[in-house]
Image: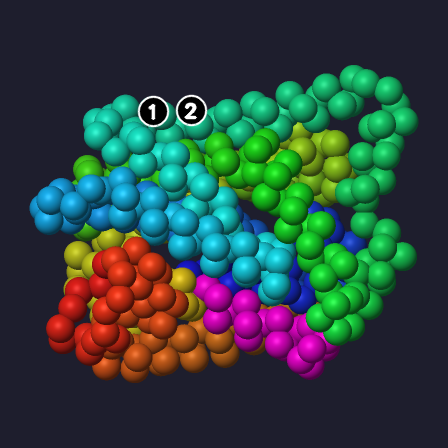
Amino acid sequence: MLGMLAVHIQLFAFPSLARLNPTAYGDFRGVNWWLWLATCVLADGKFISIFAMLLGASIVMQAGRAAAQAVPAWRTHMRRMAALLVLGLLHAYLLWYGDMLVPLALCGAVVFLAGRVSPRRLLILGGLAFAIGSVLTIWLTWSLAQGPPADLDAWKDRYTPRRVNMVAEINQYQGGWDDQMRYRVPAAWENQTWNFATRLFWQMSGLMLIGMALFRLGVLSAARSRASYRAMGAAGFGGGVLLISLGLWRNFATKWDPLDYVLLSQELMIWGNLLVALGWVALVMLLCQRGWHLRPVAAVGRMALTNYLLQTMICTTIFYGHGLGLFGQVDRAGQFAIVLGVWAFQLLASSAWLGYFALGPVEWVVRLIVFGPSKFVRSSRVVADV
């Protein structure tokens, strides 16, 4: 959850195409360049992958609890996914187009059907689903490239950052809430339709299936040997960083050409992201085995929904026109300083909140929807189910 903000801050603060081509906007020298590189190699795409895998693991846990209580697991799960879907729709269209709750909720409703599949088959299914997203994206883009040149030129023009378009986006987000809606609604709609069908559904479903398998294998509960985690970490970070580096080298060599990016560079980086995400999982499990004090970080994770939405509320207040209106004005170093501040606040606030309550406020709302009316109880009386 914390790591995701290091990536999302760029979308909150800069024109959207600056994420596809970081050279297009803002200072890209010195500390700003190094911060962008570190984020790209170690964070971008990694922590949302971990989040999806953990959601997959939670599906297995919830099903086990439901079975122990003789409650229909599918009913509880579908209510949970419906609650996430509603929250995601409100989040996407009222606050921030980059919402990931909607695709995760829709994918979660589907992968539940694989709940009784063996871990080995879950890994295979997860890998295949993840690969379908790559194959589909490459096939559609290659078909476009082989079609009428005018269509390809129009597509390239859409994804080529131009100052006039970025200035228009900056003006919209520095304006009022109504001005922001003119950009946010079509952007959110595209994410939840075309982008979801061609990439996000396959990628997120694959990650959830992998998470379900890893949980059943004991990987996500620090139950494996240290040697296995060391090997997993070395392979994940080593192979992942290599693929990402190749993708970045290709991007700079082609001057961030949109067609080359989608056909090759992006795919190298997406598969590299998966490997580095597994490397992070291995590293955290090793730290847990060594007894590191990670309780504040765990508190943020227990309040993941609350903290996810809170990050949006804080950042949109800082960057959008209904707040400070700093969209397009804060460089990457300044953005990272904001990230550090939000991290500190959420670590302290989450720990303090869970000292009194078992659930975060948004988690409580989801629990209310899934399980029906209940009191907002203190932490000593309940174990979080959401």
What amino acid is found at the position of numbered circle 2 in the picture?
Leu
Image position of 203 with respect to 167: above or below: above
Picture coordinates of residue 367, whole percent (x, y)? 30, 61
Question: Spatial distance from mark 1 to mark 2, Cα to Cα?
Answer: 6 Å
Badge 1 marks a residue whose secondary structure is helix
Picture coordinates of residue 234, whole percent (x, y)? 34, 42
Q: Are marks 1 and 2 in contact (CB under 8 Å)?
A: yes
Q: Residue furthest front?
A: 373
Residue at 26% from the left image edge and 66% from the top image edge: 373
Does the image show residue 271?
A: no
Query: Is 337 left, or right, of 214 in this rendering?
Result: right
Badge 2 marks a residue whose secondary structure is helix
Image position of 324 with respect to 45: above or below: below
Residue at 66% from the left image edge and 43% from the top image edge: 190
What amino acid is found at the position of numbered circle 1 in the picture?
Ile
Which of these two is toward me, 304 or 275?
Answer: 304
For disc 2, the marked residue is: 128
Query: Is 317 left, or right, of 208 in this rendering?
Result: right
Is 315 within the magenta? yes
Numbered range of the magenta stretch: 308-330
| Residue 110, image quadrant | top left
Which of these two is toward me, 189 or 274?
Answer: 189
Q: Which mark is residue 69?
A: none
Picture coordinates of residue 177, whole percent (x, y)? 71, 70
> For the N terminus, which image quadrant?
bottom left
For disc 1, the marked residue is: 124
Image position of 223 with respect to 3: above or below: above
Residue at 82% from the left image edge and 68% from the top image edge: 171
Picture coordinates of residue 284, whole percent (x, y)? 29, 55
Residue at 48% from the left image edge and 32% from the top image edge: 202
